[in-house]
Image: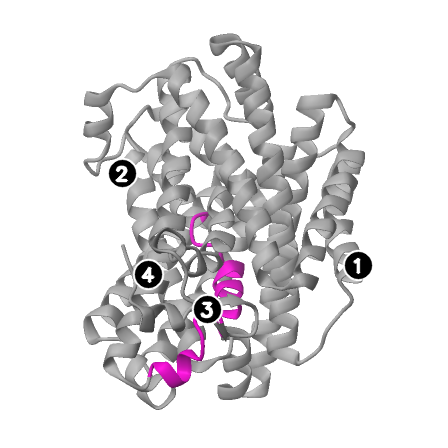
Amino acid sequence: MYLSRAEAALLPTQLGGRPATVRPEGRRLWPLLGPAFVAAVAYVDPGNFATNFSGGAAFGYTLLWVIVAANLMAMLIQSLTAKLGMATGRDLATLCRERLPRPVTWGLWVQAEAVAIATDLAEIVGGAVALYLLFGVPLPIGGVITAVVAFALLAAQSRGHRPFERVIAGLLLVIGLGFGYTLIGSGVDVDAAAAGLVPSFAGPESLILATGILGATVMPHVIYVHSALTPGRYGDAVTAGRTAEGRRRLLRAQRLDVLLAMGFAGLINASMLVVAAQLFTGTGMDGSLEAVHAGLGNELGRGAGVVFGIALLASGFASSSVGTHAGQVVMAGFLRRHLPVHLRRLITLVPALAVLLVGADPTTALVWSQVVLCFGIPFALVPLLWLTSRRDLMGGWVNRRRTTAAGMVVATLIIGLNAHLLVGLTVG
């Protein structure tokens, strides 16, 4: 894809929306990429590791279609939140504060903070497990190390969004390369994979697990984060978007970012399920992170277990830093208040360390953190659809009717299946 000189001038190279200089053709794509790759980390966090491997081990390729469907939904939702930031120059939390009654705003902030804490719990626990698997580090100490590293990654933001996005994209690449290596070792049953793309279930338990895969895919905190990363990233988008041609150019740029980032995350998730389907179907493996690590080592050699541990560690580090950033975004947006990053890091670290210190099962903690996240999805998704469908706010950027209808279908499906997951976990 090549951009004209006029299009390239709309794309920023640095934080603050400064127009990009015209560069050689091969480099013109780089200014487009970044925000969606930060969001994509949430789709390959430690919770996804356990869920996808459990699905493949228990039901083979049967639930592969769920991952594909969930990824398509994620592309739609992340495109809407990115568009909201471009069209208004403000993030979702800020717009909710400006347009909703104060009691509603406070309620949204409280649940958003709970979501951020639950997210950070999962990421810190995942990083701690990875350090234990790789180096034998005790889980509580591993949790502290993960939190410190995530804090260091956030320090890259002091130099603007671009350095932070590059670090996160690099860690995402580590995860992808790790599972690419493992996938080559395990192989793929092409016929079974094709059959797995046809929607079907293998009994009530597969339905519950499919609900978990879908419910863990759309993470509410990255809806807030993505909307905060796009303002100013494509030049003066509000001014440039006053014309139909300007909006088309900017939307193409944003959609390319989402397509590449979400597509890459989807491939990683699919590879997890495929590897588990190839190696663990019928073995009775429980799907815990420790069992997956041991199983890969037994089936493919010690190197595969090490690669899994490295990928899990990269996932914990990257997603933990994004989770902390999400907490900053929601507090600044809903309350117009800021906490020092180290203080927020300490607040979110305490619940995770408590879980690790009392000796709770890490995988169980991951699962229940995803249950908490299920509660947060409607509180981010419904306001997003409402705001992006308002012409008085979005102007020419407003959703088409079919886009809003598709979003409503996705929201209804996710809310319904998450409710089903909650009921299933509560009674089962």
**Nearer to us: label 3 or label 2:** 3
Q: Residue at x 62, y 40 (%)?
A: 316
Instruction: Looking at the picture, tell me which residue is in the foreground, 420 or 345.
Output: 345
**Nearer to us: label 2 or label 1:** 1
Decide if residue 411 is in sight here: no
Q: Secondary structure at mark 4?
A: helix
Task: Assess whether residue 212 is covered by the magenta stretch.
Answer: no
Q: Which residues are magenta?
A: 216-241
Q: Earlier in the sequence, mark 1 or mark 3?
A: 3
Mark 3–mark 2 distance (CA, rounded to whole Å):
40 Å
The amino acid marked with disc number 3 is: Ala
The amino acid marked with disc number 4 is: Arg
Q: Position of residue 262 (x, y in %)?
A: 38, 49
The amino acid marked with disc number 1 is: His
Quick check: 101 left or right of 362? Answer: left
Q: Residues within 10 Å of mark 4 (few under 14, many from 20)?
A: many
Q: Position of residue 354 (x, y in %)?
A: 77, 44
**Nearer to us: label 1 or label 3:** 3
Mark 4–mark 3 distance (CA, rounded to whole Å):
19 Å
Q: Residues within 10 Å of mark 3 (few under 14, many from 20)?
A: some
Q: Which residue is mark 2?
A: 65
